[in-house]
Image (spheres, rainbow, N blue to C red):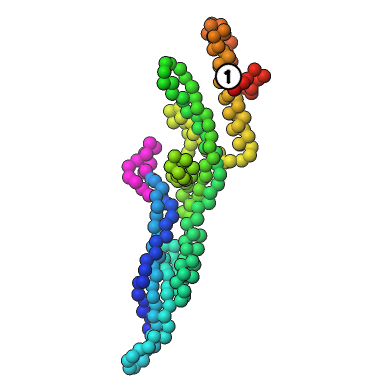
Amino acid sequence: MAARSKLVDTWHYKYEGLVDVGGLDDDLAPRVSVRERIVEVELRLVKETEESQQAPHPPKSVSFEVSCKDPAFRFAGTDVESLRIAAWAELDKAFAIKWERYFLVKVEPARVYNGIGAGLVYGYDSVDKGTAHDGTLLLREMKTHQHGWVIKPWPGEFRDKRGHVMACIPATKENEAALEQFAEAVHATRRRIADYLRPETIVQTLANLSQVRLSLAGPTARDED
């Protein structure tokens, strides 16, 4: 009995993966970006014929076969849709990304457009840290101006870059409560500065700067938005 196969179609499975885009980043590491990657799955028609001394050689069976090189699998059957479902289940399992919720915390200098001064912007947002099938770490953020999720490589070690501080921490209830409390402390400090610089107190404040305290203390009874 002889078996022959013929390529009928090639299916494309798409997933998010890292691609080297050339060049080096600020840390002299290769620049990478998250792009759409494609895995090819072959659909073949398999025919088995009876071997005999004389023609014709009648077909014994006709079936389909789907196969993939990486990840390696091979399924056979007579229903193409069932084979596709089995193949996609295998690919979904192989390329699944495990997402965990994190808080991305940023502290940046605030630009003063008119005059001379100083300020800061403190904020945090909910993001997702993803672990891909090969251990690659990804960062997923919701960008409203881009109308959806934006996925990029995990920045690696978070640190202060010329006054722009960015940190990423697990999104636990305890961390969320602490970040909210820190935001209230920033509000209280802003209100305290405003009190020091009111028209009726600014001259005295500037004359006694050694007595000015701007620590991130909790809000007082005088603190109002």
**Depth check: 167 or 59 in front?**
59
Residue 32 shows up from this direction? yes
Left or right: 129 in relation to 178: left
Residue 62 picture quarter: bottom left
Residue under the point 48% across and 31% down: 165
Task: Identify which residue is drawn at 48% across, 36% down.
Answer: 158
Q: Which stretch is magenta?
A: 19-31
The N terminus: image quadrant? bottom left
Residue 23 lies in the magenta-colored region: yes
- Residue type at numbered disc 1: Arg
Measuring from the top left, give residue 183's x and y in whole percent.
58, 28
* Nearer to us in this view, 25 or 209: 209
- Viewer-nearest residue: 214 or 126: 126
Which residue reaches farthest bottom?
54
Secondary structure type for disc 1: helix
Q: Residue at x 46, y 45 (%)?
A: 148
Find out whether residue 133 is within the magenta segment.
no
Residue 61 versus residue 69 in the image, above or below: below
- The furthest residue to the right: 221
Q: Residue at x 58, y 19 (%)?
A: 191
Answer left or right for 215 relative to 3. right
Query: Which corner quadrant holds the C terminus?
Result: top right
Q: Dot 1, how many residues are within 10 Å of its Cα: few (below 14), some (14-19), or many (20+)? A: some
Give the main secondary structure of the magenta stretch.
strand
Q: Is residue 156 visible?
A: no
Expressed as whole percent of the image width and height from the top left, the position of residue 95 reads 47, 57
Give coordinates of residue 202: x percent, y percent: 54, 9
Task: Give the answer, above or below, for where 55 lies relative to 155.
Answer: below
Vertical comparison of 13 with 179: above or below = below
- Find disc 1 in the rendering and name its residue: 191
Left or right of residue 7, residue 215 in this image: right
